[in-house]
Amino acid sequence: MTYEVAVRAEATLGEGPTWDAAGGRLIWIDILGCRVHTYDPVSGVRTVRVTEQHVGAAKPRVGGGLVLNLRDGVGLLDAEGEFRWLHREVVPGRRANDAAVAPDGALWAGTMRYDEAACGGTLSRVTGDGSVQLVLDDVAVSNGTGWSPDGRLMYYIDSPTRRIDVFEYAEGRVSRRRRFAEIEVGAGFPDGLTVDADGCVWVALWGGGAVRRYTPDGELERVVSLPASLVTACAFGGADLTDLYVTTARVGLEAPHPVAGSLLVVPGAGKGLAQVAFAG
């Protein structure tokens, strides 16, 4: 499989690609650059919105607009671009990181400390009325989260553990956490993930210059090598959800590859699942 550069950029910490079917566009972010990007692959139209603080994720909302996982909590942008806080929780030294929308429309929002201290991060379930349920309070770098096609399993990554874990999922709750797969030393750290229509899990490797595809049994089935070493997240997009979009970063690199910080795409990589919009 070969990659193409969808959007050439120099994002400090590109992250969180998400296909917005209603808008026919790919949403992605630069966490440390405080930017929310959109890209229409048909017209080539791009937009950039600057946020007032570091943004860990941006996901489509039912009826238009975005839900944002921000340094100081979760906020909402309406279709006209007006902002309001849904849940504000200021914790010095901590910021938002990856987030995902569950089958029921709730946002599962992760956090981490800037120094990546162990047990400094959290994973919380946030609903459209602003209710917050703390799910995990002992993570370091809360990252990839996704659900199986039938909605019965939830996959989750706390990057420093090198593991992709899996939970049983039902009615907004998780149980029976166990190891799904583990990234060997020297291959990078697991970062963002997406689940495809076959139930396979695609995982971006930070420091590994690749995206891996694991079968539902946790067996490594495919490796897509990329020139940028800091591969952060992946998601299927396009009208038929067959193109794999991949975000990259250049933070901390003395001599980054020319495509580091760009949005990449692997055409025809597989078949993705439709993105659930945030119900709020």
Image (tube, helix red, strand yellow):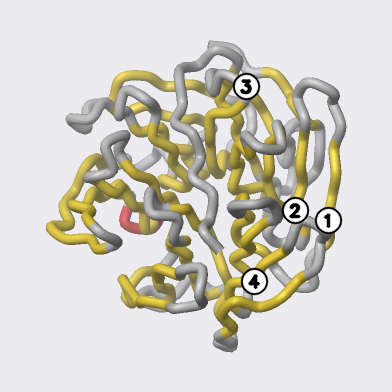
Identity of the amino acid at label 1? Arg
* Residue 80 to residue 256: above or below: below
Residue hosting label 4: 75
Rounded to the nearest angstrom, the CA distance separating label 2 from label 4 is 13 Å
Rounded to the nearest angstrom, the CA distance separating label 4 from label 3 is 28 Å
Residue hosting label 1: 49
Q: Residue 126 location, x and y as percent?
A: 45, 70
Query: Of discs 4 and 1, which sits in the foreground?
Result: 4
Rounded to the nearest angstrom, the CA distance separating label 2 from label 1 is 5 Å
Give left or right: position of 15 versus 233.
right
Sequence order check: which comes first, mark 2 or mark 1? 2
Q: Secondary structure at mark 1?
A: strand
Rounded to the nearest angstrom, the CA distance separating label 4 from label 1 is 14 Å
Q: Secondary structure at mark 3?
A: loop
Residue hosting label 2: 36
Q: Nearer the viewer, residue 212 or 185?
A: 212
Q: Residue 54 location, x and y as percent?
A: 70, 68
Q: How many C-alpha atoms fall within 10 Å of the one at disc 1: few (<14), some, or many (≥20)?
A: few
Sequence order check: which comes first, mark 3 or mark 1? 1
